[in-house]
Image: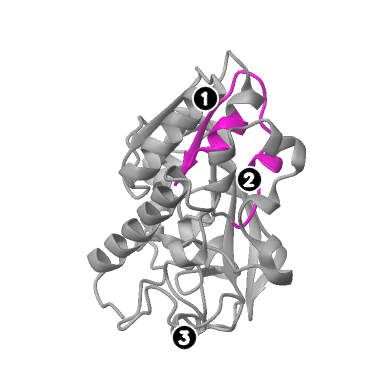
Amino acid sequence: MTTTTDELREEVRRRYAESARTVSEGTGTSSCGGGSCCVDGGSDAAKFGEALYDAEQRGELPEAATLASLGCGNPTAVAELREGETVLDLGSGGGIDVLLSARRVGPTGFAYGLDMTEEMLELARRNAAEAGATNVEFRKGRIEAIPLAEASVDVVISNCVINLSTDKAAVLAEIARVLRPGGRMGVSDVVADDDLSPAERAIRGSFAGCIAGALSFAEYRVGLDAVGLTDVVVSPTHAVGDGFYGAIIRATKPAGWTPASVRAISLPTPVAGLPVVAGSCSCGEAGCC
């Protein structure tokens, strides 16, 4: 259990660093034991990770990039990337979505990856070098304070990472800030039923396992509207737990957006005593991973 946002952030960083080391050392894939958003085999295995990418996509990339995939969707499949665009991946991990994006936007485009975990950044840079990707850059930072200029990217993608933030209102505001006018976001994330309170979400799963920190469908819509984005769509794709879904979230930055378009919004913050990681139970059980 933990009570502070700093403790939550550090535990998430530690667990994902452990997953990166597991892949880098060749001792296995990223797993629930390594703190990923995942289930442990069985019929639920396809709900998270590399199984959400088709064989052709996986074949385009270094094996370590696919083994390090910890997400709940495939944002490159819904972002409708175009040649020449600049893309930003929030929480880029081992680099799978950055590398796929770089291929989609071509040599005249560019793909940034942002991650707070040094071990993941090292893994992603090695994967980019192995893939021969020259139109990519991986930066260290937090998604609540993106180290890019205003109106600098055409598309923001992310794969099951926003739910891990302890300040989601700041993340959504930063997405709006860095998008160019007419730019869009196309992210995958875990989303909760609207009738589940933050306290109820906390008892159904862990924070690092991408359950306890999930926004509801309504909260996502309200949050994106508050930062001035339009054409907001939050669509479930598959169930990942009792009252929780993998979902696609889309929105557009209107041409007339200014920083004044952002309204103050209160989104749920971690509750006291929140479980950071699952206890001694099997992934796929209620409240685990």
Image side of residue 114 versus residue 160, left or right: left
Residue at mark 1:
130
- Specify the quadrant of the image occupied by residue 6: bottom left
Measured from the top left, where is residue 158 in percent x and y?
53, 47
Residue at mark 3:
203
Could you tell me if residue 114 is visible in this image? Answer: yes
Disc 3: CA contacts within 10 A as few (<14), some (14-19) or many (>=20) = some
Q: Give the range drawn in magenta.
A: 72-101
Q: What residue type is labelled 2?
A: Pro
Residue at mark 2:
75
Measured from the top left, where is residue 166 in percent x and y?
35, 63
Q: In this view, does 8 lie above or below 139?
A: below
Q: Which amino acid does label 1 sit on?
A: Glu
Whether the magenta-drawn stretch holds residue 74 is answered as yes
Mark 3 to mark 2 CA distance (whole Å): 28 Å
Query: Of label 2 and label 1, which has the lower sequence position?
Result: 2
Disc 1: CA contacts within 10 A as few (<14), some (14-19) or many (>=20) = few
Q: Which amino acid does label 3 sit on?
A: Ile
Which element is circle 1 on? helix
Could you tell me if residue 262 is visible in this image? Answer: no
Which element is circle 3 on? helix
Whether the magenta-drawn stretch holds residue 179 is answered as no
Query: Of label 3 and label 2, which has the lower sequence position?
Result: 2
Image side of residue 258 versus residue 6, left or right: right
